[in-house]
Image (cartoon, grey):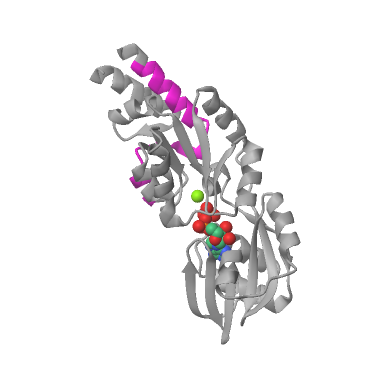
């Protein structure tokens, strides 16, 4: 590979909004066989909104007050929803995020739990009778969360995120280039599959804890494949480092951008097949 042609290639990429940290990553991109996409903030816009809430006003007040301490996009959606409904936020005595599960908080002496089935099971909360409702939300691609107060189930909240308009086309182009496309997410399997179906992804790795994301990338590498990971979040950083090529979403966190080899401006997914095409054209010219 001549340094000059690599420079021309990375320059061309930069003009399109694909920022390579070094020329070697253009060569690495040429060898890619699989692309793993994070769901929230990568395939979706990462600006979820509450679509459904069931529970009384006290439950909404405790739910929203508890979520005020979380930085998760799900929490932002719930806080915005409560604000629109003129809910007064209460002072939080204790707050704890449980990665991949939800949150625990103490407010006005009451113990609040918000999260998925796993969180409720871990605390032996009886949520029987809600399964059909949850499955319906999840089949629609919504993320459903359960709320418990002092050990009792008190309500459900469902949140939906919007898919980026160009995601289906970007995934089609990747497949046309012979790339295997995966979705990787901490979200529920049914929700993940509903979103995957909308964008044309058939390989879904769901319910992955933040600390397991890198291991999932490694497992694909162990099948002998060169893998790119695409992500925006702090919890994607180890996977971005593990992948042969880490691709950060330009609208994502600073941590992800620093961990990655490439950044795509504006989070435009069409720039991923474009980067591969530029790498092919560049390397073809060299050989
Ligand atoms: P991702 O970022 O891919 O959605 P996470 O590991 O952050 O994955 O979250 C996995 C699941 O944990 C969520 O789908 C949700 O059910 C639960 N969860 C995470 N954070 C919160 C929160 N602040 N409030 C309620 N539930 C949460
Ligand atoms: Mg994300």
From the viewer's side, name the closer residue of 265 and 138. Answer: 138
Identify which residue, 136 or 107, lies in the foreground: 136
User: In this orientation, which residue lies closer to the viewer: 75 or 98?
Assistant: 98
| Figure quadrant of the N terminus | top left
The chief SS type of the magenta part is helix
Residue 100 is situated, as x and y percent measured from the top left of the image, at: 51, 61
Magenta span has 259?
yes
Q: Is residue 273 above or below residue 37?
A: above
In the depicted structure, whether residue 111 falls above or below residue 85: below
Q: Residue 171, image x and y in percent?
A: 56, 31
Residue drawn at (48%, 67%), measured in percent from left and top?
98
Q: Point out the stretch of residues depicted in magenta.
A: 255-283
Residue 62 figure quarter: bottom right
Residue at image position (29%, 32%) is 22
Q: Residue furthest left?
A: 3
Judged left or right of residue 263, residue 203 is: right
Question: In the displayed structure, would residue 73 be above or below residue 66?
Answer: above
Could you tell me which residue is drawn at 71 percent across and 50 percent down? 139
**Where is residue 7 shown, x and y percent of the image?**
29, 22
> Can residue 196 be seen in this snapshot?
yes
């Amino acid at each position: 590979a001549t340094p000059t042609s690599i420079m021309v290639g990375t320059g061309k990429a930069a003009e399109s909004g694909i920022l390579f940290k070094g020329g070697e990553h253009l060569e690495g991109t040429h060898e890619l066989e699989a692309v793993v996409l994070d769901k929230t903030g990568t395939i979706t816009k990462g600006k979820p909104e509450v679509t459904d809430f069931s529970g009384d006003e006290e439950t909404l007040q405790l739910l929203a007050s508890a979520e005020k301490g979380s930085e998760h996009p799900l929490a932002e959606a719930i806080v915005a929803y409560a604000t629109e409904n003129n809910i007064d936020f209460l002072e939080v005595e204790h707050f704890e995020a449980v990665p991949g599960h939800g949150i625990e908080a103490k407010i006005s002496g009451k113990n609040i739990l918000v999260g998925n089935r796993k969180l409720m099971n871990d605390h032996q909360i009886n949520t029987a009778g809600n399964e059909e409702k949850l499955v319906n939300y999840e089949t629609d691609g919504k993320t459903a969360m359960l709320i418990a107060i002092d050990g009792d189930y008190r309500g459900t909240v469902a949140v939906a995120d919007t898919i980026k308009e160009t995601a289906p086309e970007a995934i089609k182009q990747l497949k046309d280039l012979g790339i295997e496309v995966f979705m990787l997410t901490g979200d529920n399997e049914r929700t993940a599959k509903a979103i995957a179906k909308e964008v044309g992804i058939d390989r879904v790795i769901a319910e992955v804890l933040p600390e397991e994301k890198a291991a999932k990338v490694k497992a694909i590498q162990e099948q002998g494949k060169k893998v790119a990971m695409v992500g925006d979040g702090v919890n994607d950083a180890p996977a971005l480092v593990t992948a042969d090529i880490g691709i950060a979403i330009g609208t994502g966190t600073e941590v992800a951008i620093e961990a990655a080899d490439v950044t795509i401006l504006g989070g435009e997914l069409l720039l991923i097949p474009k980067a591969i095409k530029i790498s092919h054209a560049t390397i073809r010219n060299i050989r």
